[in-house]
């Protein structure tokens, strides 16, 4: 992926993610979605001072950003809980994302999620869709 120190181990499904990560929360959590249902979570492995490489073929080269406008309201807030959300749509046979896992961070006043944007990461804030099923991280 061209990110120094990041060697993703993709998992599929709620049970494999819960077993691999349980309840620990690192200082820096790294979330990466791939394809329709793969999720990799890392803890304190990425050096955000190193350049991102491997994008020479693309006209878009990603750059590090230490702030995202939609996440500004969460800066300095206490993290209350981390939850895994499993996408269970009303018609799972017609939804390629059925079973995909999203990581939600719950703060005092609101929450944010890093969701699968179908082969990319998508940052969401506010109330999660009712089609998500919540799974606590504790074992």
Image (cartoon, rainbow, N blue to C red):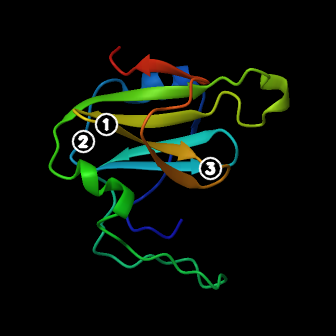
Q: What is the quadrant of residue 36 in the picture?
A: top right
Q: Residue at x 46, y 55 (%)?
A: 7
Residue sitting nearer the eye, 34 or 5: 34
Residue 117, disc:
3
- Give the alpha-carbon distance from disc 2 to disc 3, as whole Å: 24 Å
Q: Secondary structure at mark 3?
A: loop
Q: In terms of sequence position, does the residue under pointer 2 or pointer 3 come before the other?
A: 2
* Residue assigned mark 2: 26
The crowd level at tag 1 (other Cα within 10 Å; few <14, some 14-19, many 20+) is: few
Quadrant in which the N terminus appears: bottom right
Q: Secondary structure at mark 2?
A: loop
Nearest to the eye among marks 2 and 1: give it: 1
The crowd level at tag 2 (other Cα within 10 Å; few <14, some 14-19, many 20+) is: few
Nearest to the eye among marks 2 and 3: give it: 3
Residue 17: x %, y % from top left: 49, 29
Q: Secondary structure at mark 1?
A: loop
Residue 115: x %, y % from top left: 53, 43
Q: Is residue 105 left or right of residue 102?
A: left
Q: In terms of sequence position, does the residue under pointer 1 or pointer 3 come before the other?
A: 1
Q: Residue at x 71, y 29 (%)?
A: 98
- Give the alpha-carbon distance from disc 2 to disc 1, as whole Å: 21 Å
Residue 24 makes an appearance in the image? yes
Circles 2 and 1 in contact, beta carbons < 8 Å: no
Q: What is the quadrant of residue 51 in the picture?
A: bottom left
Residue 110, disc:
1
Residue located farthest toward the right when viewing the structure as drawn: 94
The crowd level at tag 3 (other Cα within 10 Å; few <14, some 14-19, many 20+) is: some
């Amino acid at each position: 992926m061209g990110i120094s120190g990041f060697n993703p181990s993709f998992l599929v499904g709620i049970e494999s993610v819960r077993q691999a990560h349980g309840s620990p929360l690192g200082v820096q959590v790294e979330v990466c979605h791939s394809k329709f249902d793969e999720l990799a979570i890392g803890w304190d492995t990425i050096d955000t001072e190193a350049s991102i490489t491997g994008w020479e073929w693309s006209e878009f080269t990603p750059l590090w950003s230490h702030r995202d406008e939609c996440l500004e309201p969460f800066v300095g807030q206490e993290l209350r809980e981390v939850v895994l959300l499993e996408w269970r749509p009303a018609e799972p046979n017609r939804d390629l994302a059925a079973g995909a896992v999203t990581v939600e961070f719950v703060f005092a006043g609101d929450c944010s999620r890093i969701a699968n944007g179908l082969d990319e990461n998508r940052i969401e804030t506010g109330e999660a869709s009712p089609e998500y099923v919540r799974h606590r991280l504790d074992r």
